[in-house]
């Protein structure tokens, strides 16, 4: 099973910086030295944005590996299950706050960024209060029915951590509203040091548990978030227009986020529903085994996320200048690049799967190492879907991606649920392979239909070579 990361293909703030890199071109009559300086500034901003995301992704990867080494399998399964629930909440948050923030901060509210940020903090409070109540209630229910495998503590921990982590994400994005990824990267580094350092201290003092892990993540995110908040006036200019009223901003966010929420739900189902399914049908320890398997795909997934962000503005420009007739060769090249990269990654890892498991997990989870070739097949098919997905976004057709993922979600429910119940992890890995294959084929079919029906994006370029 392959995950699209908590922010899927397009982290809005990274896309903003990457788009600047791709779109930086010399204007007529612009001195070469001035153009070179401008280009270097954009390259620097793009690099800092990728560094920022890399530090966050790297900290999540390291936390997953350390907890897999230090926790018992059922405790690690509880941590993984709680994290999958947090990701569903984060998708809702992304839909109604993060993605609209990236759009409106550069358009409707670009002259009142400080006031807009205050309004966003109010929306953040409302959304996260809902999440705390939901997750806290789930923790209380798990405790009441006598779950003694770490699940009540994991759910209580993620209930505490979720508003803090999402607050930290909001403050990181605040710097991207004025294209200042450097300070966000500093915050990501502080978070990385605080959380990983805290985990080592907790382990040395025999205090490590799913609850303590989430509590450390909460403390690290909260401290870093307030540090970034203290720096925000140095980046955001004073408002030159009236800040938006809360009701107005919420209405705009709601109108924008409804469709994004639908995409988020059908994204979560085929990738993360298996953690609660496996824990329900086969026990919490198998959820830990599933997470241990999926950890090995994370480095490749993070790399592809960054590449897709860089390719998107390029694909949009090519389609606009050369028309959709260029989509076929372009999608083949991008798809081939991602598939070959995936095959190369797994060709190195598969022969070493047992030593890698022993090295990463201190001898644990070796019994599931034989699943790695099937995980590799699923992630390779997932990688192939990047090609058509990038092109569909480039031609401004996100609804097409929704329909492709909707089919993948339907297959996951129809096939994945009974397969997981009957065959455990075998059912999971094969269900994911089928869902990823369906998503790729449907995306390619929709893109082919689009290239035949949608006219050239820039009619003024008709007839140009």
Image (spheres, rainbow, N blue to C red):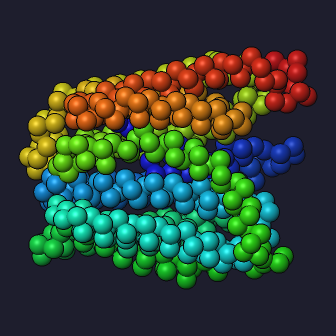
Residue 129 location (% of width, % of height): 50, 73
Q: Residue at x 61, y 62 (%)?
A: 97
Camera-side residue: 101 or 460? 101
Q: Residue at x 23, y 43 (%)?
A: 281
Tally of numbered tags: 0
Quarter of the image for the N terminus: give it: top left
Q: Residue at x 19, y 43 (%)?
A: 282
Residue 207 lies left or right of residue 233; in this view the side is left
Residue 192 location (% of width, % of height): 36, 66
Camera-side residue: 36 or 218? 218
Residue 253 location (% of width, % of height): 69, 61
Q: Residue at x 88, y 21 (%)?
A: 462
Quarter of the image for the C terminus: give it: top right
Vertically, is 233 above or below 152?
Answer: below
Residue 424 lies left or right of residue 239; in this view the side is left
Camera-side residue: 309 or 295? 295
Q: Is residue 168 visible?
A: no
Residue 26 location (% of width, % of height): 78, 44
Q: Residue furthest left?
A: 363
Q: Residue furthest front?
A: 145
Residue 347 lies left or right of residue 301; in this view the side is left
Vertically, is 142 above or below 362?
Answer: below
Q: Residue furthest bottom?
A: 230
Vertically, is 218 above or below 365?
Answer: below
Q: Is residue 129 visible?
A: yes
């Amino acid at each position: 099973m392959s995950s699209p990361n908590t922010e899927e293909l397009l982290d809005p703030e990274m896309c903003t910086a990457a788009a600047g890199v791709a779109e930086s071109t010399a204007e007529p009559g612009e001195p070469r030295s001035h153009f070179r300086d401008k280009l270097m500034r954009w390259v620097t901003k793009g690099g800092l944005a990728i560094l920022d995301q890399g530090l966050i992704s790297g900290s999540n990867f390291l936390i997953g590996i350390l907890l897999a080494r230090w926790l018992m399998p059922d405790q690690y399964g509880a941590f993984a299950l709680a994290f999958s629930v947090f990701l569903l909440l984060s998708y809702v948050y992304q839909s109604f706050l993060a993605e609209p923030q990236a759009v409106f901060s550069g358009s409707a509210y670009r002259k009142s960024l400080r006031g807009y940020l205050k309004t966003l903090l109010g929306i953040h409070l409302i959304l996260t209060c809902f999440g705390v109540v939901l997750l806290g209630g789930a923790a209380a229910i798990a405790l009441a029915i006598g779950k003694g495998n770490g699940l009540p503590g994991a759910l209580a921990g993620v209930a505490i951590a979720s508003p803090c982590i999402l607050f930290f994400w909001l403050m990181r994005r605040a710097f991207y509203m004025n294209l200042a990824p450097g300070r966000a990267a500093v915050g990501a580094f502080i978070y990385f040091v605080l959380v990983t350092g805290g985990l080592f201290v907790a382990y040395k003092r025999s205090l490590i548990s799913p609850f303590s892990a989430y509590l450390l993540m909460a403390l690290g995110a909260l401290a870093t978030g307030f540090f970034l908040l203290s720096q925000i006036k140095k980046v955001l200019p004073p408002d030159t227009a009236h800040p938006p009223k809360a009701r107005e901003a919420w209405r705009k966010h709601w109108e924008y986020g409804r469709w994004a929420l639908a995409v988020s739900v059908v994204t979560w189902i085929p990738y993360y529903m298996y953690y609660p399914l496996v824990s329900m049908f086969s026990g919490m320890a198998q959820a830990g085994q599933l997470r241990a398997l999926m950890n090995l795909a994370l480095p490749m997934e993070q790399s592809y996320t960054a590449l897709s962000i860089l390719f998107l503005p390029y694909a949009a420009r090519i389609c606009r200048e050369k028309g959709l007739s260029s989509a076929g060769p372009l999608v083949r090249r991008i798809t081939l690049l991602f598939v070959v990269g995936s095959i190369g990654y797994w060709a190195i890892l598969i022969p070493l799967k047992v030593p890698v498991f022993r090295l990463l997990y201190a001898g644990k989870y070796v019994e599931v190492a034989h699943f790695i070739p099937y995980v590799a097949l699923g992630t390779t098919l997932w990688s192939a879907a990047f090609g058509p997905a990038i092109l569909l976004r480039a031609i401004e057709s996100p609804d097409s991606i929704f329909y492709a993922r909707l089919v993948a979600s339907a297959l996951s429910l129809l096939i994945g649920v009974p397969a997981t119940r009957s065959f455990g992890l075998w059912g999971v890995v094969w269900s994911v392979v089928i869902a990823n294959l369906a998503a790729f084929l449907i995306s390619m079919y929709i893109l082919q239909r689009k290239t035949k029906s949608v006219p050239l994006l820039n009619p003024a370029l008709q007839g140009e070579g």
